[in-house]
Amino acid sequence: MAGPMPARAEISPGDLTLTVTPELNGNASPFSREMVLLHIRGVYRQAILLEEVVQPSLANFSWTQLGRDTWSKTRLPDGQVAVAFDRTIAIFPHHPGDFTIEPFIHRLTVNDGGTRKVVDVPSAPVSLPVATWTKEIGGPDVKEPWWLPARDVTITDSWSPDPETVKIGETTRRIVTLEAQGLVAEGLPPRPVMRTRGILTFAGPVTRETIITPTGPVARATYQWDVRPAVSEIVPLEAITIPWFDTVSRTLREAEIPARQIGGGLPDREEDAKPIATASPMMVAAAAIGAFGLGLALIGFGIPARGRSSRLDRATRRALARHAETGDRKAFRATLDPVFQREPELVRAWHSTPVIAEELAALDAGLYGRSEEATPDLRTLAGYLSKPVRSSTVPAPPPSRLAELDGRAQPL
């Protein structure tokens, strides 16, 4: 039996309304590839049995939906209670021009006087002009610099080990995380060029991800290099600037990958810089005898294996403390991203410590809009994460596939 066809139900005017409202950054016409939020809202006096949104083609735009549709109750000006439907879509115009967003259609199945009827509720067309860039530098159409329209841009730079401590022939790894609000990952620039005389650089993989939040997508790219000094002298590595267009203030700005010093063989800790006291011949002899006796004891009896100590490198600890002082949650979290990739044992130790695991979970929940609760004290969390932790040298047993059936708790 064929389903009901769309029809004009005998419903009072204004009982079913659908509106599409664009949210413009700075109340200005967007430029190419700049995010515009479309808020789609339906208000319905009748009970809705079934529903389907028919979206226009959006031929001149890229788009992504921000989360799931929401349904709620709302009170109308006349005091009646109605059902409200909400959907938010982020669109990105491909090029300048005067465009029209064709109507969205909400196809509803309603109960009208005991009869099921299908009613198409259209929105009104929306005019959306996309501006042409007229400034002398930058803009969407030039190859250099990369066009990066965003609400905010943050950069986190981490090294392991500290670049000032490496000597000729040794290698340090640099990880730079670039995060832009109001952009998808494909819109982030390629890996910056990091090259100077006196060092060898080996580019690693680039990872990109798009995080969907209620206020728009957040794009994140992680760039990686292995750096090795080729000369014994200290090599200054210049800062790298990344221009971006602030869609809120409508101005060009710059983010910076900071300058660093490579090589020199400087100690990573203050304790390492202290002069080594010269031991007397008698002390050397006594220590040798003691070590020989301890070795015999270990061979005869053995000792239980003890875990080794792990700790964040000094540069990361300093970055966490700096972001904690300024209360910059995004930069604080972005500093931890490379650690989660390269220090699995350290991360497992954090997750096995309840107070640290709870603070990290609260940070993510508050940062990405999954919770309205207060975020943790960043200074306290930075202190926890900067302390050395002891991790077991024995690998954890693999989780049992029957764990959910036999009721045994599995280690984190």
Image (cartoon, helix red, strand yellow):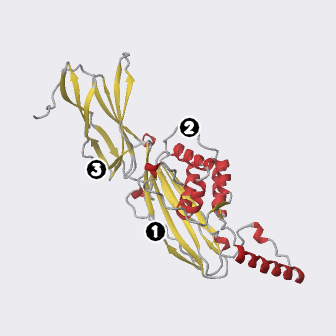
Residue drawn 27% across and 46% down? Answer: 58
Closer to the camera in the image, 209 or 380: 380
Quarter of the N terminus within the rendering: top left
SS category of the residue bearing label 1? loop
Q: In the image, residue 129 lies at what x, y percent?
A: 33, 44
Closer to the camera in the image, 159 or 347: 347
In primary-sequence order, the first of circles 1 and 2 is 1
SS category of the residue bearing label 3? loop
> What amino acid does circle 1 point to?
Pro
Say the numbered circle drawn on residue 373.
Answer: 2
The Cα atoms of the two marked residues, 3 and 1, are separated by 32 Å
Q: Residues within 10 Å of mark 1 (few under 14, many from 20)?
A: few
In primary-sequence order, the first of circles 3 and 1 is 3
> What amino acid does circle 2 point to?
Glu
For the view shown, which residue lies furthest in the left direction? 1
Q: In the image, residue 45 lies at what x, y percent?
A: 30, 22
Q: Is residue 204 left or right of residue 88?
A: right
Closer to the camera in the image, 400 or 392: 400
Which residue bears the numbered disc 1?
205
For the view shown, which residue lies furthest in the top direction? 78
Of badges 1 and 2, nearer the viewer stands 2
Of badges 3 and 1, nearer the viewer stands 1
Quarter of the C terminus within the rendering: bottom right
SS category of the residue bearing label 2? loop
Which residue bears the numbered disc 3?
60
Say the numbered circle drawn on residue 129.
Answer: none
